[in-house]
Image (cartoon, rainbow, N blue to C red):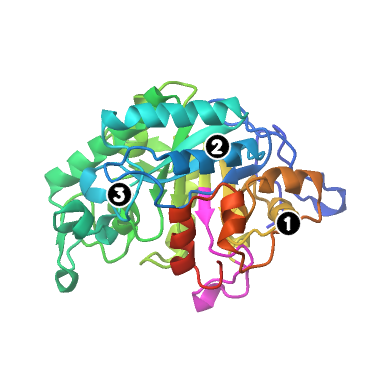
Amino acid sequence: IGKAMGHDGIGVRRRIGMGKMMTRLSDPITFEHGPAMRNRMMLAPLTNQQSHADGTLGDDEYDFLVARAQGGFGLTMTCAAHVQRTGQGFPGQLGAWSDDHLPGLTRLANGSRAAGSLSSVQLQHSGRRAKPDLTGVQVTAPFADPANDVRALTTAEVEQLIEEYVEAVMRMEKAGFDGVELHSAHGYMLCSFLDVANQRDDRYGGSLDNRCRALFEIRFGNIVADMEIMEQARARTGPDFQLGLRISPERYGIALAEARLLAERAMLSGLIDYLDLSLWDVTKVPVEEEWRDHELIDLFMDIPRGRTRLGVAGKINGAARAQMCLDRGADFVLIGRGAMLHADFARAALEDDGFCEVERPVPGAYLMGQRVGPIFVDYMRTAFKGFV
């Protein structure tokens, strides 16, 4: 687990016996594309319901995100922004499917840049978790679920979805963001393609190769002719635009062994700048019995990653736990709950290695003082027991 993993040596060190050189939270980090990140902390994408019904950016969402950029995060990432109107999964969700969204998105990209932070939009389609009362149409997903009135996408619809993902990527570049992250975790559309239950009889289901195909078609570095989301996104954006990918390493029909293989393929593909592992808790043990003699984080630190950076998210509640993740081999960390509680979580962790998030529950007024709008406060009150 602790051996050197063949990185390029740009500020990233691995634990090597007693003579290890430590990566610190304050160390800048470079990527294959685009600018360097000023430190090792990204703002995790956070559902907050603070934008408008048509997907245009709301002032409270802008204020929340720019406050985190001002609070020291190296990269400030939006909530999941849906790439098709029919992909909406929650009220007030930021949209990425129309040029009508560009003015607000451009404002947000500029606000993050002015604060010294890189900016990224997480691109998503809710898939089987879409809400018909918001979209007005039947839910679609890679495979049908008649009990829940979910219809399987046709092959033509999959191809159209891929194109609209890529158009959304290009739209975010036009808006001035430094990059995007493709959300292929938590049971949403792209994650559902990876589900072992995806036994479509076309080229997008069945084998692991087919289930990965909507994201990318690659066999350990041998890129074949078909151009899917990641290949097209890379081909149709500039050399300074960053691409990230978020995956769930377990649950949602994903076997841990396949998740490890997917992570390796993605990181060695040369198509993404970073992989974001949503671990739920960076100290948890795997769900699958055969892997329970390891913590989940360690099962991904030994995977070859080429020049791709690897980040982890999950209950990183302060400076010590964030540093622990770097010591275990992660290149950066993503902060979610702590960033809800502290607009300046990143700066505080950099200034005090003993910093830890405030205990919960907290008053709604406290959160509003952290530039969390009233709609977001109400959402947290209902979605996170004991938070507010």
Q: CA distance from mark 1 to mark 2?
A: 27 Å
Residue count near mark 1 (Cα–Cα under 10 Å), binned few <14, some 14–19, many ≥20 = some
Q: Amino acid at mark 1?
A: Met
Residue count near mark 3 (Cα–Cα under 10 Å), binned few <14, some 14–19, many ≥20 = many
Q: CA distance from mark 2 to mark 3?
A: 24 Å
**x and y percentages locating residue 316 in the rendered image:** 64, 58
In depth, the one of 287 and 133 nearer the eye is 133
Q: Nearer the viewer, mark 1 or mark 3?
A: 3
> Across the whole image, how many numbered discs are drawn on residues?
3
Give the residue pinned by disc 1.
324
Give the residue pinned by disc 2.
66
Residue count near mark 2 (Cα–Cα under 10 Å), binned few <14, some 14–19, many ≥20 = many
Residue 178 visible, this orientation: no
| Figure quadrant of residue 188 | bottom left
Q: Nearer the viewer, mark 1 or mark 2?
A: 2
Q: Is residue 4 left or right of residue 178?
A: right
The residue stretch that appears in magenta: 276-295
Q: Identify the image quadrant of the C terminus.
A: bottom right
- The first of marks 2 and 3 along the sequence is 2
Question: Any magenta on residue 233?
Answer: no
Seen as rendered, the residue at the extreme bottom is 289
Provide the secondary structure element on which disc 2 rests.
helix
Give the residue pinned by disc 3.
125
Q: Main secondary structure of the magenta part?
A: loop
Q: Residue at x 63, y 40 (%)?
A: 73
Seen as rendered, the residue at the extreme front is 365
In depth, the one of 52 and 215 nearer the eye is 52
